Amino acid sequence: MAAAYRVELERDESGWWVARVPRVPGAHTQGRSIQQALNRVREALSLWVNDAAATDLEPEIHLPLASRRTVDRALAARKRAERAGEEASLVTLDAVADLAHGQAMSVRDIAALLGLSAARVSQLALEAERQERTPNRVTKQTARSKR
């Protein structure tokens, strides 16, 4: 297993990213972007350790507190949006199954009700049918309750 090294990254006053590996004194460099700084710190690390190309770099990016909070809020919002999207997909699949099979509605009517294209409704109807035929599957309700 390859060694892992924590890499501290911080922007200097001229906007460059300064990268250093605390465990390896002398392994430091800079780059115009985070990725460039990481690439260059790997090169610098190769002067101090064997097989630096195979090591895992674990970036720890230092930002001003206000910026860190903004980034954290953005990441949390994206995670919530992802979960909401997953739930929307499950509920939409349930709705298509109910309307197509339970109510015997046409694909066009379901599309109009759900604001989807008829082609997408057809895809979802096929997916719902496959799920109904798959033995030993976790029900959608059980999957939702685990969240």
Image (tube, rainbow, N blue to C red):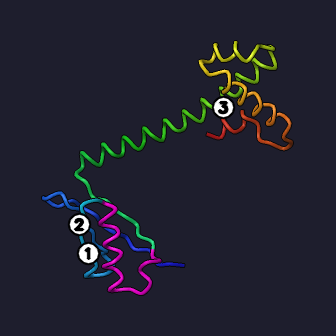
Asked if the residue under mark 2 is in contact with the one under mark 1, i.e. CB atoms within 8 Å, the reply is yes
Reply above or below: 116 against 135. Answer: above
Front residue of 1 and 38: 38
**Amino acid type for the residue under numbered disc 3:** Leu
Badge 1 is on which residue? 28
> Does residue 83 show up magenta in the picture?
no
Please give the residue where the numbered disc 2 appears in the rendered image: 18
- Which quarter of the rendered picture does the N terminus lie within? bottom right
Indicate left or right for 26 with 126 as reference.
left
User: On the image, which quarter does residue 106 sit in?
Assistant: top right
Say which label, 2 or 3, has the lower sequence index.
Answer: 2
Q: Which badge, 1 or 2, comes first in the chain's sequence? A: 2
Q: Is residue 102 left or right of residue 84?
A: right
What residue did someone put label 3 on? 90
Disc 3 to disc 1, C-alpha distance: 48 Å
Residue at 71% in and 30% down: 123
Query: Where are the magenta residues, as a range?
Result: 34-55
Please tell me in which quadrant of the rendered image residue 97 appears: top right
* Left or right side of 107 for 51: left
Q: Main secondary structure of the magenta part?
A: helix
